[in-house]
Amino acid sequence: YGDSAKKAPILKMYTLGHNFIPSPIHAGGLRYHGMAPIISILSEKNIMSSVMHHQTEVIASGLMFARTEGILPAPEAAHAIKEAIDQALLAKENNEKKNIVFCLSGHGFFDLLAYKEYMIGNLVDYEMPNEEIQKALTAPDMPNVDETQF
């Protein structure tokens, strides 16, 4: 299901299950049990891939962007900024010219707490233990979808 109340339809996506509740992180919009269906299929077909960044480096990148561009990005958008910066640095290191596109989906004026917590040293990185992931993936209510239906 797309939601914990089981009101939304079952969606074909990479998921930890509709009952999975992620730990609190700075970017509330990223606290979801699954990956969007379109992103899931693009990942499955190897058209795109995902990367993981810790929240402290993400917020640091958001602050760098704010200082250079004058726009404080939402923490969710700061993830894309972090990866865009990494890709630019990699291209520079390899003496390559690249066009790098990212989505700045919103400003961070409603999420100032994450930036404040980072600046005063209270924001810490969190990596979900593998045990929690395995527990979610083997939960009795995890749907067993027949792949041939799609």
Image (cartoon, rainbow, N blue to C red):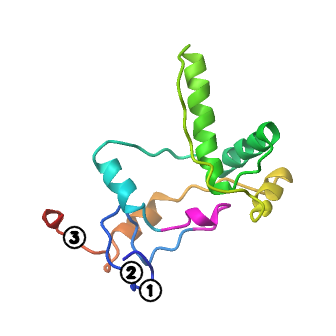
Where disc 1 sits, the SS reads: loop
Looking at the image, can residue 22 be seen? yes
Residue at screen point 32% across, 80% down:
141
Report the amino acid beneath label 2: Ala
| Neighbour tally class for label 2: few under 14, some 14-19, many 20 plus, Cα within 10 Å | few
User: For residue 30, what is the image quadrant?
Assistant: bottom right
Please indicate whether residue 3 sits to the left or right of residue 108 in the image: left
For label 1, the residue is: 5
Q: Amino acid at mark 3?
A: Val
Task: Tell me the kind of residue under disc 1.
Answer: Ala
Crowdedness of circle 3 by 10 Å Cα count: few (<14), some, many (20+)? Answer: few
Q: Are marks 1 and 2 in contact (CB under 8 Å)?
A: yes
Instruction: Please give the label number shown on residue 145.
Output: 3
In front of the other: 102 or 88: 102
- The picture places residue 14, in percent across and down from the top left corner, at 36, 61
Q: Quadrant of the C terminus?
A: bottom left
Q: Which residues are magenta?
A: 23-32
Mark 1 vs mark 2, foreground winner is 2
Q: In the image, 14: left or right of 130? A: left
Location of residue 49 in the rendering, given as x and y in whole percent from the top left corner: 41, 43
Mark 1 neighbour density, 10 Å: few (under 14) some (14–19) many (20 or more): few
Q: Is residue 124 magenta?
A: no
Residue 54 visible in the displayed image:
no
Residue labelled with disc 2: 8
Q: Secondary structure at mark 3?
A: loop
Compared to 122, does 3 lie above or below?
below
Of helix, strand and loop, which mostly describes the magenta segment?
loop
Q: Position of residue 121 (x, y in %)?
A: 82, 52
